[in-house]
Image (cartoon, rainbow, N blue to C red):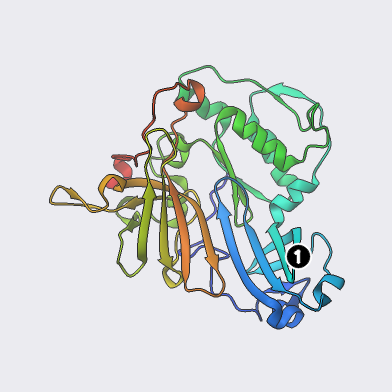
Amino acid sequence: MAKIVNYGPKVAGFGPLDLTTITLDGKPLGNLYGNAILDMFIQRTISGCSTVTLQLNDPTREILRNLIKQGAALNVDGLEYNLTQFSKASDQLQMIFESSLTYRLGLQQGQTKATPGYNITQFIQNFVNEAGGTLVGPDYETIWPLITNQPIYKLNLVRGTSADPDESSWACMNRLASSVGWRIWESANVVYFGPDEYWLGRAGTNGNPPVNEAMGTTGNNIPVLEEFTQKIQLIDFDWNVGQPFGQATVTCLLDNFEFNIGEIVKVGSTINGVNTMGVATGYWMVYSIQRDMYRPEASVVLQVPMPIGEYIAPNSLPVPGLPLQPLTSAMIK
């Protein structure tokens, strides 16, 4: 099993932000752009990598004429990102930086020698090691029989396809993850790879969800999200029996921001037999987190985990996107 990284009670990269502490190419961001900055927000998602979006006003085109180069390093709250996208619309410019780890994985390109085999985890681990990162997740060959009761699915382990011979390591990792129905994401320069059963603590663990264990939020410490509390303002959700991935959006205050991607949280509670959040009451997985530099609020999107069986033997029956009830005895003891 790969290493679990503990970032403590606060999520790395989501601490207090100040233009004097954020650097771009080694210089304070405020010195470079001053009053040109309109907005900046940080996002992490379970479907990709961490990004920082910088929006600027450039009526004199001074920034455009002196544009920084691709790959320029942005350091925010101790984490490094690299410039990967740039766009202009009228007087406004937008720069998107992605985590330095996925940026380096994107630079690893070209076809490798095909190796038919089972050990997807080790294959991905090699790419992450080469990029100087950390991989968190279970061993594919060990956990697959536990969650499927089926023989191990053998893959052709290779980077580069006939349609995309210059495939990057990051694209290859996502392709392989999709082929076995596992999640892969990056958060704070760590790559996470594994099935929802593992992140729920139902297989390959000691009964506790791994991200929760790293955050110290197992058992009675599991985060409980309720509207109109010190932490939470609103919890909005959408439920459709035709959509397997039910989602909820939580608006919370930054001073109390302490959630991480892949962490299991409980929405609402049951008081005298009544669920405080109705059908949304139950256990969810943190799907994405986003904060704005100039606003005191952050947004957390939750998602109902997907059983591996839906990937292995999909059918046309409606799958209700309801939260899990209950989770594991280790979490609710």
Dot 1: few (<14), some (14–19), or many (≥20) neighbours within 10 Å?
Answer: many
Identity of the residue furthest to the top in this view = 151
The N terminus, quarter of image: top right
Identity of the residue furthest to the right in this view = 65
Identity of the residue furthest to the left in this view = 272
In this rendering, does residue 132 appear at all?
no
Residue 285 screen position, x and y as percent: 43, 47
Residue 328 screen position, x and y as percent: 32, 40
Residue 156 screen position, x and y as percent: 71, 23
Q: Viewer-proximal residue, 311 or 62? A: 62
In this rendering, does residue 175 appear at all?
yes
| Left or right: where 315 falls relative to 156 | left
Residue in the picture at 61% in, 28% down: 179
Label 1 is placed on what type of residue? Ala
Q: How many labels does the image show?
A: 1
| Residue 233 picture quarter | bottom left
Residue 274 screen position, x and y as percent: 17, 49
Q: Viewer-proximal residue, 73 or 83? A: 83
Identity of the residue furthest to the front in this view = 90
| Left or right: where 156 falls relative to 64 | left
* Residue at image mark 1: 73
Task: Provide the secondary structure element on which disc 1 rests.
Answer: strand
Image position of 12 with respect to 190: above or below: below
Image position of 53 with respect to 4: above or below: below
Image position of 120 with respect to 6: above or below: above
| Residue 165 picture quarter | top right
| Left or right: where 42 falls relative to 130 | left
Residue in the picture at 46% in, 41% down: 199
